[in-house]
Image: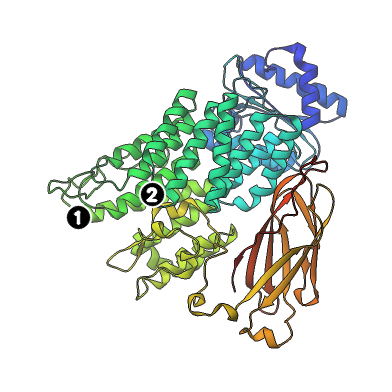
Amino acid sequence: MSFVGRTRELASAQRELVARGLLVVSGGPDSDRSAFLDAVAREVADEAGLAVYRLQVADAGERAGETGRTPDEVAERVVEACRGGFVVHPCVVVVDGVPAGTADGIPAGTDGASAGAVDGSLLAELIGAFAESESFLLVGTTDAREDAAALPSGRCADGWALLTRAAVHCDRGDPRAAGPLLRRAVEAHQVAGDRRGEAWAVFLYGRMCRLRGRAEDARRLLHTARETFRAVGETPGEAWAVGELARLATGSGTPDPDALAEARRLHERAGDRRGAAWAHLWWTVARADEPGFPWQEEFTNVQGRFHEVSDRLGTAWTLHHHALTLARTDGTDGVDGTGGTGRTARTGGTDGTGRTGGTGGTGGTGGTGGTDERRREADRLFEGALALFEEADCPHGRAWTMLEYALRSPAHRFLNGEWAAEIRHVFHGIGDEAGEAWVDLAEAGPSPGGEPPYELACRYPTALLDTLGWTEAGDPLIPRAARDTQPEPRPDFPHPGDRDRPDDSRAHVRLTLLDDAPVPDVPARIALEVVPGPGHPWSSAPLPPLTARATSLGHAEIDPAHGVPADGAEFRFTPHRPGAHRLRFTVEDPATGTVLQQVEADIDVVPSDPGPHRPTTPAPRPSARRA
């Protein structure tokens, strides 16, 4: 429903704001929307005895005497003003004039109504700024559609706000922080009976799994989300799910441009310009290395799309891939006169804001002058991407741009003697061990046998690593899809030398379910043992004081968090709902901090009253990463 211009809805809006702490109002003329926001703010402020602060995004620059500022700069100042004081003491803050857009594919509507549009990055930053405060936040968007709806995005327990915050973490390249938010979001939408909200939560969970390199989990969740979107008539959600499924194929080393084109058509049919821009970008990236593909024209078109919806993150990734293509190719844009596939900048570059630059190309000569010009143009695009990633607070994109810039610009690398350590530090900050492994490879160069290092081989599909190339200077041509994920090591991937070691020389982890079939909210005991083989040194000596760390990956608790196998490690597993639950046990050597083995077990939990056909006791199904 829409509160805009309907004073009879004032009481309802006030209750919504007090209950959730945040109200987004969209639709109607600016004057009506602003008056309504002010009326709600006064009611809440008078009742709670709080001060009211008002910020107008559209003219914040003029009020501050800074008429030369861009909309993005004005928006940043609004967020900084909020962070600077409004979140410290309880108050009511009204932020009006938020430009139209979409919140990372999460629509602003509720109750199945047509969604109002809000600026995704600005709204997400405002929610993040107020997430832990006691203040009230009212946001008004400039979309003038009369059928637009309000977004009930509150703090803490509200599913839509949790989804937005999780999406921001994924955009930053830090999916670790998204998991807990998404689990809470799923619960919130299930409690509310909101199938549409639950579908978005499942979709984002699938996206997070794709980022973590868990392809099968991602595929299952994205398929589920897509079918639910279809069932509730959520075309934008269906389009995003189709696009993410297509990107799964890209991550496996086999791009699916047709599926990305279909996602783009679905976004356009739903009127989701931002979604269409992202699908257009990934379609262009998937085809950029095809002979004769006009990548220069397509990257320029995509950048124009992102500029129209003020999406800095999309613009940054477009510049990144545009620079990457330019730096890796020579000749003309498409098929050259000899039938080759060399390419060069044909229409000039962009300045990071969507405006096209000059006309400096090489005329398809492929000579030294053309190579130098392409390198300068690629450097400029990398610099533009790096600046935008920093503005958008996306360390994942920043680290990859720094790495590719250093690899493609010898002068830049030479001037920065600590280039590898700096890039590795950024990857480490978001827990991206795969990114750190690519930096290690760039420093070490190709191996004599041509085999990829273990830290990459245990994380990425063989088909993707087969596309790894090397320049004459010994720098890696890292597959584009490598930056789409942050995969963890596969638990069953053999460690170096495992193939040559007899099985009886290994130590294994054994899990035993000590109680009957687990039911919700009733603790069940699980015993963990480390069992050395006959040829293992521990078979004839006391087991060292190893540490076993337990983690629940679902809606369950496990206690204690740590155990010592030598003393008989036993854990209490308390699920909170029926169904499959996954647990992870990590065995470590505390003396050296080394992870020796990691085991994941799926345990089926039956309902408290399962009826006459009670299933037999399920056994944990471990999948171990061997020491």
Percent from the top left, x then y, of residue 40?
76, 21
Task: Please name whichever residue, 457 or 65, is drawn nearer the observer in this view of the structure.
Answer: 457
Residue to which mark 1 is pinned: 369
Q: Which amino acid does the dot numbered 1 rest on? A: Gly
In the displayed structure, 614 sits above or below 144; it is: below
Task: Please name whichever residue, 451 or 127, is drawn nearer the observer in this view of the structure.
Answer: 451
Q: Residue at x 33, y 37 (%)?
A: 298
Of the two numbered discs 1 and 2 on the same chain, state the one appearing first in sequence. 2
Is 294 left or right of 153, judged from the image as shown?
left
Nearer the camera: disc 1 or disc 2: 2
Q: Residue at x 26, y 53 (%)?
A: 329
Is 291 left or right of 94, judged from the image as shown?
left
Local packing at callout 1 (Cα closer than 10 Å; few below 14, some 14-19, many 20+) is few
- Mark number for residue 236? none
Percent from the top left, x then y, of residue 257?
37, 40
- Mark number for residue 254? 2
